Amino acid sequence: VMGARDAFVPCQCWITSHFVREVGGTIMAIAGGLGASGAAFTQLVVGSLFAMCLHWTDGSYDLAWRWSLVFPAAFALVVAGWSYNFSDDCPLGNFIDVKKAGLMMERSAVDSFRSGAFNFNSWLLFLQYAGSSGVDVTMCNGCAIYFHQQFHQNIQASGAIAFLYGFAAIYARGLGGYISDRLGDTFQLQGRLWIHFFVMILQGFFNIWFARTTHLHHSMIIMVIFSIFVQVRSTVLPMTW
């Protein structure tokens, strides 16, 4: 719910209204990379906050985790308020004013949803996205826990290792968007599809390798390489708007 209301989904919608499709993949990828890297910093910061809260709550793990998650939630509210007060919906201004001026046609949200839900390509992209961003979300949620349980690292160390996974997004997503746009210029939609398929195969290979690695340092290296392919694949999806 938080992601749909104030983070990833509005960001992607916002970008498509501000940039033309020839550079849309690169711009969306850069924005996505900056946003996804926030998950990395959250892993790094919240782990340290947890240790502080654990001291304040007299060793209560459950209460310490709840208090540590208050900090990113409060920060999200500050960013939401800043965006609401100091940004426009599109280059022409806010949608309400643009519609009043007759520069934008009214469209029912139900009609918009129906046109997407009954489009077969939407479901193909849904399945592809589940294997890229879906994997990314799963890793962001479980990476620190994995290193804590599998390699017996403490909470702070596990969060720092998970930071390495998420931080790859800050450059890898931009790279994926740039490659997608360049191949799109040369080979149109088919070029985007081929690079997506190639990166998908590499991502799956490193995913299996990562799961079978039993040495901490090797696991960290493979995790970062795996993350790069996950992030690149998330942004070489065909830009269809």
Image: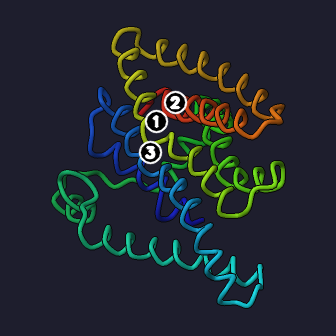
Residue at label 3? 32
Q: Which residue is mark 1?
A: 173
Percent x, y of residue 72: 52, 71
Give the amino acid type for the residue marked by disc 3 in the picture.
Gly
Whether label 1 touches label 3, CB < 8 Å: yes
Residue 218 image offset from top left, x and y in percent: 71, 32
- Please say if the residues under marks 1 and 2 sit with CB atoms less than 8 Å apart: yes
Label 1, residues with CA under 10 Å away: few <14, some 14-19, many ≥20 = many
Disc 1 from disc 3: Cα separation: 7 Å
Question: Cα distance, mark 2 to mark 3?
Answer: 11 Å
Q: Amino acid at mark 1?
A: Arg
Residue 114's place in the image compared with 179, above or below, is below
Image quadrant containing the N terminus: bottom right
* Relative to 86, 135 lies left or right: right
Q: Which residue is denoted by mark 2 in the rendering?
A: 232
Q: Nearer the viewer, residue 159 or 9?
A: 159
Q: Earlier in the sequence, mark 2 or mark 3?
A: 3
Q: Earlier in the sequence, mark 1 or mark 3?
A: 3
